[in-house]
Amino acid sequence: MSGMNNQGRPSSPHEASSGEAIVTYTGNRGLRLEEPLIFELDNSGACGVDLDEPETFTLRLGKLARKGRIGLPGISEPDVMRHYVRLSRKNYSIDAGLYPLGSCTMKHNPRLNEKMARVAGFGDVHPLQPQKTVQGALELIEMLAHWLKVLTGLPAVAMSPKAGAHGELCGMMAIRAALEARGEGAMRTRVLVPESAHGTNPATAALLGYKVDAIPATEDGRVDLAAFKAKLGPDVAAIMLTNPNTCGLFERDIIEIADAVHEVGAYFYCDGANFNAIVGRVRPGDLGVDAMHINLHKTFSTPHGGGGPGAGPVVLSEALAPFAPLPYVVHDAEGFQLVETTTQAKADGTTPFGRMVSFHGQMGMFVRAMAYMMSHGSDGLRQVAEDAVLNANYILASLKNDLSAPFEGPCMHEALFDDSFLKGTSVETLDFAKAMIDEGYHPMTMYFPLVVHGALLIEPTETESKKTLDQFIGTLRHLAKAAKGNDKGLFTGAPHFAPRHRLDETLAARSPVLRWQPPVPAQAAE
Amino acid sequence: MRYLPLTDSDRRAMLGVIGANSIDDLFRDVPEHARRDGFVDLPKRQGELEVERALTRMASKNVSAGSVPFFVGAGAYRHHVPATVDHLIQRSEFLTSYTPYQPEITQGTLQYLFEFQTQVAMLTGMDVANASMYDGSTACGEAVLMAHRVTKRKKAVLSGTLHPQYRAVVENLSEFANYTVEAMAPAIPGTTEDIIARICNDTSCVVVQSPSFYGDLIDLRAVAEAAHAKGALLIAVVTEVVSLGLVTSPGEMGADIVVGEGQSIGNGLNFGGPYVGLFATKSKYVRQMPGRLCGETVDATGARGFVLTLSTREQHIRREKATSNICTNSGLCSLAFTVHLSLLGEEGFTRLARINHANAVKLADGLAGVKGVEVLGDSFFNEFTIRLPRNAASVIDELVDKDVIGGVPVSRLIPDDPSLENLLIVASTEINTDADRAAFVAALTEVL
Amino acid sequence: MSEIRFTDQHEWVRVEGETATIGITDYAQEQLGDVVYVELPEVGKPVTAGDEAAVVESVKAASEVYAPVSGEIIEVNSDLEGAPGSVNEDAMGRGWFVKMKLSDASELAKLMDEDAYRAFVDGLA
């Protein structure tokens, strides 16, 4: 043998050890990296931007120049990049795996949406620029509004609410405004809400001063029609229904419910969180809905971003349309215009109940949703609902004998299970969910809705393949079997493989530490 | 369709497992009357190329702020956002992650929220901050409701310094929640004595914005004292968060709650949203604070970690007794804020503020030199009001024809007040160059 | 001689003379999980039986605590602020919530005694 590089090295693993017992110097474990707080990386003198100090000038701050340090850490760009990249790697995400969260609609977030939102003509325009310089922006808002109206079969839409809960507030404010315009504001003090409703529903009603009256469910998971009718009266302002409901079931009696509500002069608010089940196939307007918020970050794929931002436009019936809040877009021969003030509304002949937010709404989310909707088209969107419902039913049918399903199928876009199948084992819903983390899944929604015990609500969405679902089903079967076989090892102390083990939420709530504090300098020796 | 993984063969197999003949079987609970066989009346699916083409064409009808000398503020500000920020917020694990309800696998989100909360508390000079609200205006509305909860009173005084749309949001929320609002006339410039005179024994809070909507810097100290003497809270509003790099913090001046708009840091203009609401307060009020909160704790091995906490204030637990109905925060926008502020650091952030102020001073001097223009107010940060010799809205339109976007006419937000018709609010941030300022001055001179 | 009574909402009331001490039962604290915070009423507040007297919070739940009897709040357990865990550790003793001056002792007769409450709880399982 001759030449350089003639020294080999081992190229296959010899005895593998799990390595669990090894303690590393850094605390890292291979690609599982520990990362301190940004404040703990302070290296004052370092800075992640290059800005030139302005030439000396006289401040014009009155006596209000800030004295003393703010306390922000100094860090170079490479270190900032590394810090946040390392943090990102501790997060589960839809790009990385299935997120079976019921009523959250964790579907794929197309990057075309991101690209379009960043086009300068959309991303770099100010809400208060002269309107003739933003005609394309106003056109986009109108276009999205049109699509939402056609998909829901309702004639008007309020675009400004910033999130689903904000949209609920908008819809209920429109309802109250309509009732007050009729002179019935004071007499209508009650709002009917199913027991299975999401917490935002009663919170919204209570915020507006309504008494919340809970409607029980029947054994088949739907609104108890008789109980509901018994609660109706001339003092009811509205019903707030989710359809399909939070048990994943279509409210069969919905038209009868809507008719009964209208008969007593009340309004039908629909929580649109579950619109993904029916988009393109069923129009809420045909079901008697008067107002419905749409979560663009659910049905229309705008990214969840770790908790926001969302957007919650609200479609409105003919009766509620005049009360839609400021601002809204109008279109005439001269182009697009914002109606932003009460004065302009008066000239336009409408009676908006007021303004919910400064500026015009979540334009960034509008562009993303529009790109998504145009990509799917009316045919694609109908397929979305069908595949979403198919996927959920596939899970329900495959798992109903391994887990326990409280309601007879078929379901809509989400499948509900309860913890009956864990009865007699030492495993609770929480432990079951944490064991899923070790299997590489984000757990499904747990303990909601409250109408069944230890709820497990699974919404796969339409962007999951059969192969992914099969593996998911296999995993849950495996865990259910292990739980029933009392294989506690999988569950006690789970998750074992996540960046953190179970966290002490009691400690966090009893002794809240809500910010970093600079360490107190050590006392000088007496 | 490219986003839908199921094939027809998959669908058939799955229907088989379910025991249904067709997908229609699964929709059998839909009332007959509401069933629709065809597609709704909207265009059919399109490929990326077509969608890009259509949307880009629409976008090209807009004049982007970066393409002309640009001086628009009034609650949203054009700043330079470093490339690192946009890159990081597009990482899968941040962009496509959900609310961190399973903390073991969302420490990335939770840790940046903890950093965000700390940064906001530092900037505002307060004890604690939440993990963000939708925007400054809704944060302001929520602050007023919180003050009512804390003081058990029902009347809010809104000073004339407040952004007119913020005022409208507070008035709307108060009307529906059955509270009273006393809104003062526009403060051009107004005095703190005027504000103090309105505080009574039944006042729950007084809301003051500084820098004001008109750009003026307000010394909050006397207002805070007067409010506290009557058992009321001072809510300070900051719509240009970069001002906190140079101006005394509201916390230092005695504010009880500070709300603001964080858009200026890390987030682009986006025609009004998504933005990021800042909300900070004193420790003693933390359980009355709305919105998500991230707290520090340890895991089962003793390692430091973070979790959402004090959740019993929130709607998903308290339902009708919640502090607010709010569910989402501004997630990704607060990450953008955190990253940008981390890049800036103490040195960069304070320097950025000085540059902003310097540019505004230069602009004010330049505009003051234009015949017929009067610069109002003698203390400001990066925004001020000028009085023109004629209708400001017309002047702005004419400036557009000269490729300058010069500011916001006050009449756009407060119509029907002839005394305000000639007023223009002008902002100047670090993005403005000498050439921009010269162009503005020249165009305005021509137009007037 | 102190007597103890229970409500079907799992509150207990122990009476000594005119003073009633009120808390939540051991069963209740177990259902709730780790108590993290107790919101107590103001001293001097008049209360009617059935009114909300306090709110007890765990991490994932919040529960109203109703006054089993009518009267006036004369003392609240301020130790709970720093040590809410006492409610879990000793719900029937150190974890007491409020003391009231009774206005109508006859209301006690409507409440369950210890045996009746035990039977009630057994029936819930």
Image: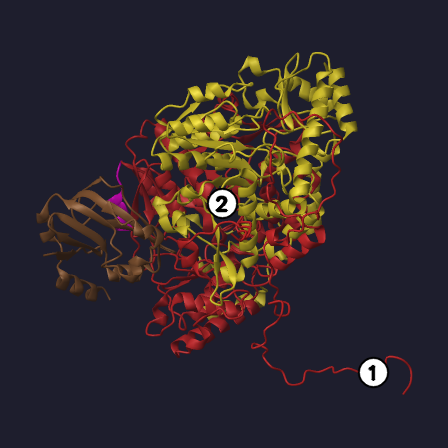
**Residue at position x 49%, y 65% from top?**
B302
Q: How far across and down, in percent of the image, does residue C3 sit?
A: 12, 57
Q: Is residue A473 magenta?
A: no
| Direction front: furthest residue | A526
In the rendered image, the vertical position of residue A56 relative to residue B132, given as above or below = above
Whole-percent x, y for residue A260 in the image: 31, 42
Label of residue B141 in the image: none
Magenta residue span: A225-234
Q: Are discs 1 and 2 less than 8 Å apart at CB?
A: no
The residue indicated by pointer 1 is: A7
Nearest the eye: A199 or C58: C58
Q: Chain C, which colour?
A: brown
Quickly name the residue at label 2: B130
Callout 1 amino acid = Gln
* Residue A132 visible in the shown view: yes
SS state under label 1: loop
Chain A: its colour in the image is red
Q: Main secondary structure of the magenta part?
A: helix
Query: Can you tell which chain is drawn yellow?
Result: B
Quadrant for residue A59, please give it.
top right
- Which residue is at the front of the view, A477 or B363? B363
Q: Is residue B399 left or right of residue A207?
A: right
Residue A301 placement (x, y as % from top left)? 57, 51
Provide the chain ID for the residue under circle 2: B
* Front in this rendered view, residue B388 or A285: B388
Residue type indicated by callout 2: Asn
Above or below, B296 relative to B174: below
